[in-house]
Amino acid sequence: MIAEQFRRQKTVLLQTRKRDGTWVGTPVNVVVDDEGRYAFFRTYDASGKAKRLRNFSDVRLAPSTVRGRPTGPAVTGHARLLDETEAVAVRAMLAAKHPLIHGRLVPAFHRRRGYRTLHYEVTFEPQ
């Protein structure tokens, strides 16, 4: 499974497409489901990546440093916005893998700023 390569990776470089076709990279934390088929990440509704994903679901993911410098090859896929019932499990997985950041800091920051937290599922294209 393609997503399996991201299971131990704490940060990946998520690239999303702009309307003019150029790619914009952002480091994000990801988790992988138990079967290793999907990767999941979260963001907030006013972020640039969320706005770009409303127009184009195409994404690229590459292992990276915390600052977003790629450390491996990118794989292509499609991101799908999860509804609230689907997001419950992803929220728990993110909090388990990243207890301080996604268990406490990100949820508190989003609440304080009045942001709506969005969770995405990435399905990878066959290589």
Image (cartoon, rainbow, N blue to C red):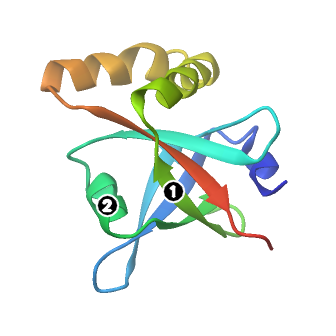
Q: Quadrant of residue 39?
A: top right
Identity of the amino acid at label 1? Ala
- Mark 1 Cα shell of 10 Å, populated few (<14), some (14-19), many (≥20): many
Q: State whether residue 64 appears in this view.
A: no
Question: Separation of disc 1 and disc 2 at Cα?
Answer: 10 Å
Residue in the image at 26% along x and 58% along y:
51
Q: State whether residue 122 appears in this view.
A: yes
CB within 8 Å, label 1 to label 2:
no
User: Which one is in front, 71 or 111?
Assistant: 111
- Disc 2 on helix, strand or loop? helix
Tag on residue 54? 2
Tag on residue 79? 1
The location of residue 34, given as percent across then percent down, is 79, 32
- Disc 1 on helix, strand or loop? strand
Q: Quadrant of residue 29?
A: top right
Residue in the image at 57% along x and 41% along y:
40
How many numbered discs?
A: 2
The location of residue 35, given as percent across then percent down, is 82, 38
- Quadrant (top left/top right/bottom left/bottom right) for the C terminus: bottom right
The location of residue 123, given as percent across then percent down, is 64, 56
**Pointer 1 or 2: first along the chain:** 2
In this picture, residue 59 sits left or right of residue 71: left
Residue in the image at 70% along x and 69% along y:
125
In this picture, residue 27 sits left or right of residue 40: left
Residue in the image at 62% along x and 17% along y:
96
Is residue 64 placed above or below 57 in the rendered structure?
above
- Mark 2 Cα shell of 10 Å, populated few (<14), some (14-19), many (≥20): few
User: Which one is in front, 54 or 42?
Assistant: 54
Tag on residue 67? none
Q: Quadrant of residue 20?
A: bottom left
Is residue 68 placed above or below 59 in the rendered structure?
above
Identity of the amino acid at label 2? Arg
